[in-house]
Structure formats: structure tokens, C-alpha cells
Amino acid sequence: MTMNECKENILYKISGFSGEVDNISRRFMELGLVEGEKIRICGKSLQKKVFLIEVRGYLLSVRASLLKKVQVEKC
Amino acid sequence: MLEVLLVGNPNSGKTTLFNSLTRSHEHVGNWHGVTVENKKKAFSFEGQEFLLVDTPGLYSLCPLSFEEQVACEEILRGQGKKVVNLCDGNNLKRSLYLTLCLLENGCDCVVAVNQIVKRKNSKIDFKKLEKLLGVDVIEIDAEKGFGLEKLKKSLALKKQQNNLPYLKMIEKMAKNSKKMQNFDVFCQIKAFERDEKFFEKRGEDAKKIFEEVPKDSVQLITKLRFEYIDQILSQCQSKVAAVYGKSRLDKFILNKWLAFPIFLAILSGIFYLTFFSLGAFLSDLFSNFLSLLTNPILGLIEKNLGNGLVYDFFASAVFGGVATVLSFLPQVVLLFFFLSILEDSGYMARVAFIFEDILSKVGLSGKGIYTLLMGFGCSTSAIMTSRNMEDKNAKIKTAILCPYMSCSAKIPIYTVIGGAFFGAKNIFYILGLYVLGVVVAICISKVLDKTVLKSKKQSFILEFPPYRMTSLKRIGSVLWKNTKDFVIRVGSVMVSMNIIIWLLSSFSFSFKYVAQCGGESMLEGFGKILAPIFRPLGFGNWAIVASLLSGLVAKEVVVSSIAMFNGIDASATRLLSASLLLPTSLVYFSSHASVVSFLVYCLLYTPCIASVSTLLQEIGKKWTILSVFVQLVVAYFVALVTYNIFFAFEIFGFFVPFLTIFSIFLLFFAFFCIFSKIKKKKLCSSCDSCDKDCAHKKI
């Protein structure tokens, strides 16, 4: 499944990136969203268009549509 | 002089360190992207001179936004310069990523670990970290000044050799490619990172180089770096269970139903304290103090030189308007004080998260809310923060919208003119003006996004900083900087502008003193030409038009010139307010409708010269001209509509105009619904803009 489909407060593991590497996926990787890393969705905005993600011990807010490229699996 | 670059992740405390080392008062805040351009200042230590360069924050040497590009270029140009890499001690897991990028580039690095808020049970073995990274690692507290002496000493030391173990693996991988064999390690890494811009600048064909690179090379490189970081931290940092930036407060602040009411309550509270209660009390106090200073001087001039030209010059041009505006100093400083508390608290990142849903609909990013909120303080600095945007069109759009936010320079206009007519109810009018500014900005953004400034969807990737309290040092710095800026502005721009206006309003075209010889002043002549244009807005008086023209220099000048026209010769805001109600005054408003219309026009028309020149610098001539033109047209149109609505309320009472406006609104709403349905149907054939797998695609 892709990361934009993740449910709140469940632990997932990043299994890879789909498609070509662009600036956004590179930035995700630089921020710690690399293969094998565990993530958790801590919150979603009013219209669920922005996710609050817990990754590598800090919080990151990201637009959900950008997370389509990140493949995840349940831990 | 040795040049030292201050480099680090956004919000790691670079500008705080810059201020501490160079004793400056540069703007700092607890959110991403406060610094958008390089700032330079010299300092000396033990006889050696250093030039410190504060760069905008970045995560790696592959820039994404404009301000990251500025920092990256400075680093890549900076061979032979010293680099201070500032790391957030509470988030080393992520901060060290940039450190590794800098070391790969061969930078002469000193790592400064800034402990902004010490986390419980978090211990770092700095000596071990130093050994593993192969460079000096110094623990500092940029705000309190702890560790700065040690940092300065290490700047004078020679470059150390570092040896990152994973670089050998990269060199090994690069051997498989013919093109990369001639590259140094850094270029090989850039090829693995697929950094197109880097190779374009070197004049090389990036695509051909990338053909020989494995497809998952970016993942490989980032994974290597993070694995090494984990390896380092497992040896020199105690495990921390808590998530950095996570707080129980967020349950309320980010709550679906509470987020917006909390935001509005905070803003309303700030405005109430600034314009009324505390702000009004301090302003009155300061106004009385100014009267105590100016009245004896004017008395002395009158006693010795009589009530003639010289007295008129000092009373009108120097003390009258200038002292009136100066009496608003406490309110302006108070507004900046509250904004700085907001910035430092960590709440701004939450506001961006809350507003992303709304702002993305009008072609802006949630990050744009920083810029727009900054506009409540000063448009000039707000325009500069538009560099946070990643897309050129989004940057232009955000910069164009800044002047619609009601800046602090407009406080005297609202307080004096609104206060004269609406009394205690003025807070609702002021709040209404602030809201109107935001609504107009949103509408313009939507129009620009649909027409000339279509922008790609902004990425919106934003870190959540922890909540923190503002320090006393920071409060002192904010109060000092804004007091100084305001007094300098009033003392330089406003005095000179007032003198020009006094000369133009006191002398006729044949250079005769109007007060003695009679006749029409030069300003009256100009004003009378333009006045008919403003008559439909309810204030077609030449003196009001002249004061609006003078406001092009600085918005505070509108009030000072009105004070001059109405013959207010001391810092008496009450006298000035009362004069606006007198039909014998030069600046006189006949109805509430014309006052509201004037305030709306002041809110929306062209900003001060400083803002226009910043716009010119940031978005170029073409867009600045368009922006100024749009502002004039929008201000005129909105003021015209406002005047007619309020005039109808004055003439017909409440119900008839209310029902008319309500039915017009319903009509527009019906049209909007019909058009959006048509548009949705059209989307079915080529539904590219949907975020989700929508029903249209399935069809």
C-alpha cells in the first residue's frame, strides 16, 4: 500500500519508492523516509489532505498527495 | 579576514548564533525559513578577524526552494572557507545528515551542537562524536552564549582530515561507470543523487551521466548515510524514547473543531490587547509624555518669534503630525512583541498545517501563512519571506499578496480616524479591516492562480518544532529593534515628507505664503485635480486625496499629514480625532460610510515605497507594475462597494440593504454551484488534477 492510505496511530515500515526519483522523493529520503524506516501517522488535517508523520524521532507534516510514491507495509 | 559560513537545518538556531557572535539583532523565530538570504557581519577573536555569513537553512546539498539554493551556492563556492555546521542537539538523527553531506564535499567543518531545550535522559558523548566524525564537535547554547569561546577558538585551527567509511563503497560503485571514473568523490555522490542542476551548472549532460548510474542510487546513498548516522549515535547518544516536537497541547490546537476557533481567539486577543486595553493605555501615556516635551518648545518659539511662518513650520511640519504618529509607538511595538511570541512558540508550524487545506485551494502553500502573518507586522520583511516557496509562480503570488495584509503602519490610521467616529465599536471595524485584507488576498490569489500565475502544487513538507517560551533576551531584542526602526522611520522619512507637504500646502505656485497672502496652495491645486476621482468613494476632498498621496511614501504619513492639514500642533490624538468631525476642518468626513470607505481604501491601496522596492527586487519590474495596478483598482472597487453598502444602511436602515445584499450573495452562490458542477463534469474526461483515485477515473 502507499503511504497516503495509511491509518492513524498504526506503525508501518517503508518498503520502497515507486516511479522515478524526483526532487520530492529525494527530499523525503533526506528527511529519513528511507527503506526499512518505521513511520506512524500521528494526525491528519481537517480535510485529510495533510498528514502529520512521526519518523526518526521527530514530526513531519506532509501533503498526503505527495505520499503516493512511498510504499509501506504494516509492521 | 577568514570567512565563516553558518550552515544548518532550518530552525536549528543559526541566526541566534549569528546574533550572539556578532552582537546583532537579526530576526529569529521557532519555525522553518526565517532566514531567506545570506547575512554577513564581522567579528574578531584574539586579534583575528572573521566574517560570519548566516545562510538560510537546508537539509542537504540538493536544494528544493529558492532560499535553499542561496545557501547551497554559498557552500559550493566556499572552498577555503570555514564552515560552522549547526546541529540541533535534540534531533541529531536528522541533523547529522547535512553534516555528512558537508564532509563529503570536503568542507573545513566545525560541528556546533546547539541544545535549544535539553531533553530528559538525553546524553551525548561529544568526544566520541568528534572522533567518529573526524572534526571538532562543540556543545553550545546559541541563546545563552554557552560554548561560544570554545567555538571561536576552534575556528582558528587548521582543517582536520576526516574519513567517512562509506565513501570507499561509493568509489567502488563509481568504478563501474566510465564517465564517473574521472570525477572526484563529491561529483560521484552528486551523480548517485541524480542532482541535475549540479551537472547543468558544470555544463555537463546530466542525463548521459545518470544512464550509467543504478536506478535506486538515491536510495542507496541516503541509506548509507543514515546507516552511518545510526551507527555513530548508537555509540555516543543515549536512547531517547520521546518524539521531538510532540506535545499534548496538539490534541487541542490541531483538533478538527477547535483549531480554527483557537487561531481566531489568539489573533483577536492580540488585536484587542494591541489596539485597546493595554495598547490604548500605553499610547495615551506616551502621548501625554510627548506633549510634555513638545509644548514648552512650541511655547518658547511662539514667545520669541511670534505666531508666524517659523511657528507654523515647527507646529505643523515637525511636531504636529510627527508627534501624533510617534504616540502610536507603544501599539506598534506591542504588535511586534505578540507576533514574536507567536513565532517563538512553535505555533506557526501548526498554523501552516491547519491552513494547508484552505490555502492549497487558492494556489498557495500552507507555508504561505507565515508570509501572510508576517505581513501584519511589516510588508517589506514579509515579501522577502516569500522565498520560502519552491515554485517561481507561487513565490510571485505570495509576494503580491503581502501588501493586502494590514501592516503595523496602518494602526495610526485605523485608531485615529476610526476612533473618532466609532468609539469603542472601533475594534470591530479594525478586526473587519484585518479580515477584509485576508479575504481580498485569498480572492486575488485564486484569480491569479486561474489566470496568469498558475503554479504547481507546492510540496508542503514541514517539520514540527517543539513548543517553547520566548526568552527575556529575545523580548528585549524585539522591543529594541522595533522601537529603533519606528523612531528612525518617523524621524527621517516622516519629518522630511512632512516638510515637503508643509511647503506644498503653505505656498502657492507663485511661492507666496498662503496663510498671509491667501490664494490656493500647490497641494490644493494638485489635490483638486485628483479629488473628483475619489468623489464616488465618499471622500472627494482635496486634502484627503493629498494625504493619501503622501501615504505612498509611508502609511503613517497619512495621519501626520491629516494632522497638519487640520492644524493639530501637538501629539494630541484626541484633538485630531475631534477635528475630523468638524465641518470647518480641511480633512472632514461627512458620514460613517465615507470613513469606512476611506479606511478600506487605505488598507488596500499601493503599499509604501520600501515595500514596492522590495517587490521590485523579489519579483521583477513586470510583476511589480501589475501588482501596483491591481492594488489601485482593487482598492478603488472595494472602497466603492463598501461606501455604497454603508451609505444604503445609513439611508434605508438595516433591513432593506441587508436583504438586497443577501439576495445578491445567494445569486452569486447559485452561479458558483452551477459552474462548479459544469466544471466537475468536464473533469471526467481528463481528470489529472485529482489527488485521489476519484469516481471520474473509474468511469
Image: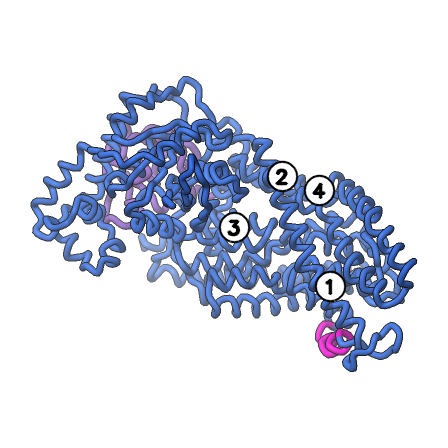
Residue behind mark 2: B266
Residue contact between numbered discs 3 and 2, judged by CB atoms under 8 Å: no
Q: Does the image show residue B662?
A: no
Q: What residue does disc 3 label?
A: B371
Discs 3 and 2 carry the same chain letter: yes
Q: Nearer the viewer, residue B623 or B88?
A: B88
Q: Chain of mark 1?
A: B
Q: Chain of mark 3?
A: B
Give the label, 1 or 3, closer to the camera: 1
Residues marked 2 and 4, same chain: yes
| Label 2 crowd bin: few (<14), some (14–19), many (20+), radius 10 Å | some
Horizontal relation, residue B192 to residue B151: left or right: left
Which residue is farthest top? B121
Closest to the camera, between mark 4 and mark 1, is 1
According to the image, label 1 marks what residue?
B498
So how many labels did they put on this image? 4
- Where disc 2 sits, the SS reads helix
Residue B150, given in percent of the width and then of the height, sits at 40, 29
Q: Of tags 2 and 1, which is closer to the observer? A: 1
Residue B331, horizontal then vertical, whole percent = 70, 45
- Badge 3: residue crowd in 10 Å (few <14, some 14–19, many ≥20): many
Which tint was used for chain B?
Answer: blue
Pointers 2 and 1 within a single chain: yes
What hue represents chain A? Answer: purple
User: What separation in Å lies between label 4 and label 1 (alpha carbons)?
Assistant: 31 Å
- The label shown at residue B272 is 4
The answer to whether the residue labelled 1 contacts the one labelled 3, judged by CB atoms less than 8 Å apart, is no
Vertical relation: B89 (above or below) B490: above
Q: CA distance from mark 3 to mark 2?
A: 18 Å
Residue in the picture at 80% in, 58% down: B320
